[in-house]
Amino acid sequence: MSELPAVGLLWRSRKIPLAWLLLTRQPVRLAVALAGISFAGILMFMQLGFRDGLFDASVTIHKLFDADLVLISPRTISSISMSGFPRRRLVQALGDPEVKGITPVNWNFLLWRNPQNKSTRSILAIGFEPNDPLFLDPSLKAKAQLLTQRDRVLFDELSRDEFGPVATWFREGRTVESEVGGKRVRVAGLVGLGPSFGADGNLITSRETFLRLLPDTPAGSIELGLIRLSPGADPAVVQQRLRNQLPKDVTVFTKKEFEESEKDYWRSSTAIGFIFTLGAGMGFVVGCVIVYQILYSDVSDHLPEYATLMAMGYPLTALLGVVGREGLLLAMLGYLPAYGVGQGLYALVRSATKLPVEMNSTRALVVFSMILVMCMGSAAMAMRRLADADPAEIF
Amino acid sequence: MAALPSNGNGTEQGDGNGNGASSPPGAVAPMVDLQELCHWYGEGEMRRQVLQRVDLRIHPGEVVLLTGPSGCGKTTLLTLVGGLRQVQQGRVTVMGKALEGSSRRRRQQLRRHIGMIFQGHNLLRCLTAEQNVQMGSDLLPGLSYRARRDQAREWLRAVGLGDHLGKLPHDLSGGQKQRVAIARALAAHPKLLLADEPTAALDSRSGREVVDLLKRLAREQSCAVLMVTHDPRILDVADRLVEMEDGRLRVAPPLLATS
């Protein structure tokens, strides 16, 4: 509101806060307007939140890796179909003075048999040398030693229920055995990774067991190479150096790029992005209609009063300013509840779906901008009605 | 009424235009000068003349009442003088400024110095009495918010509504609303007051009160008044009575002789 107490000249030139009074002296209409704007804002928050949350969920596992740079095959387009590349490329990378450590990782989908009802379902299996660092979370280190025995797996307790009550049984002390890729395995421990877009469940095993479960894997072929750099090294510089050194049968990504390429796949190759963006667009349109209706009828109701002001000598621009300020006030007052409710609903969605849906400043700003555009655009449309305020007609 | 805000702008109006130089003592330049004013409504076949060669002068501080049957063009005349309509033919000079061919913006600027009182009170429903009057004093340049608000309060006291500062229009009676409207019109320190049937919505007693008040305050501010009215009970407030019929003026025998 331009009438906020401010210093000096602004205070002196203060006028009656007409826009504010026009809105607040009709509390019911104001409440309806704010409800409409907030609803539109909440809709946009939810749709955009879901969209970003789903994209974030596609890299649940990607984020966990302890790596600065990542090698993958150029033929890999997403985590649901990783292609292999020669393991020696990763070893070659070790030649770079800034590379501190490497972890070769196998990554593939296998059929897991539900130990309870014997149905099978595709599960993501990650294979690595149990002595190598794999995840940023240090708690895996101790459990990894359980994998040195053959045919042992660590089961992701956050996997969806369709894989069977593995975690429950394991905690009860039962020996949980199941069949993966036609081979018998025993659950040696539990880890908490979380389902992602492509994988409903995960298991971690040693490279040796992984190759037994997937005997067709070519020797010396891996799907993922993790590279850790010495502290202080610039990943972008090393990335460029490795790109120049290594043959073209591998792609060098920073960890961030690795995540982004996965998100990009879901963004561009699926309808998800479109659907949720469209949903947010619908919220925007609904909001526009509501605000326009409110402002238009507000201007219409007060037309004789606006005409009176013009007869008194107020210029048309002053009246346009009043309508514009009404739009601005509606935007600000309507945004606050939308933001609050949005936060609450995000928390609800997080607890109900395990999707990483969170408020971030970019989205908060995007939604505010959209509400602002919505209100100011509607105000601009409603201003056209002011042209009908002819002071000569009120006598 | 000594505490009334004075009409401080002096003789700032009148910038030449032939007949409007600031008044030398003795020879008083007219506040309003209409010459051969004609006006039509409609287009083509429907074109209908509402004003026919009207000549009228109003001098500073003069109270002129304009009467006549409805539809005779009184209100049209008022809107032309008030700069609310574009002049079609003839000359309209208000406060020394020629209005024929003037831009929208110039007319709007001029309206700041003309107070207007309407048939309905036309107060802003969402504003209190005090705030409504301040919409008038807000038009004054160079005054602080506090000064403009204090002036608004003074005006409301002057019209006898000092106890109703914070009331919304719908809590006021018809006569009170019209008095707020008068305070609002005078708060902008006008040199000329245009009133269109200000008593039409009032009973005879409050109508009388409003008109007396209007005349007294206008006189104190040496503000000229052009009032359109049907109301025979208030004709005696006029310095000069002008009758209109079919778009022409007929000067009536003066009630209180002035020329």
Image: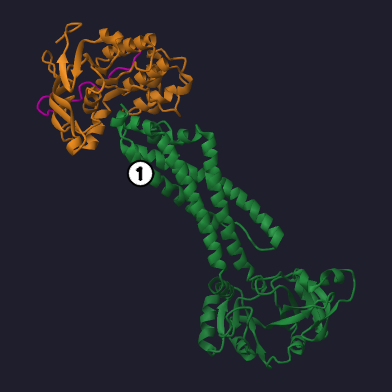
Chain colours: A green, B orange
Q: Is residue A301 left or right of residue A187?
A: left
The residue type indicated by label 1 comes to Arg
**In this picture, is A301 found above or below A332?**
above
Q: Quadrant of the C terminus of chain B?
A: top left
* Residue position marked by numbered label 1 in the rendering: A384
In this view of the protein, which residue sits in the foreground, A19 or A298? A298
Disc 1 chain ID: A
Which of the 4 image quarters holds residue A169?
bottom right
The reply, left or right, for residue A104 in relation to residue A330 is: right
Left/right of residue B257 with respect to residue B205 in the rendered view:
left
For residue A308, above or below residue A330: above
Image quadrant occupied by the N terminus of chain B: top left
Residue A99: image x %, image y %? Answer: 61, 81
Query: Up-down: is A144 above or below A371?
Result: below
Q: Residue B246: which quarter of the image?
A: top left
- Magenta part of the chain: B3-21
Specify the principal SS of the magenta part.
Answer: loop
Name the residue at 54% across, 88% down.
Answer: A246
Give how far across and how far down residue B10 sits, in percent. 22, 21
Q: SS for tag 1?
A: helix
Label 1 Cα crowd, 10 Å radius (few <14 / some 14-19 / many 20+): few
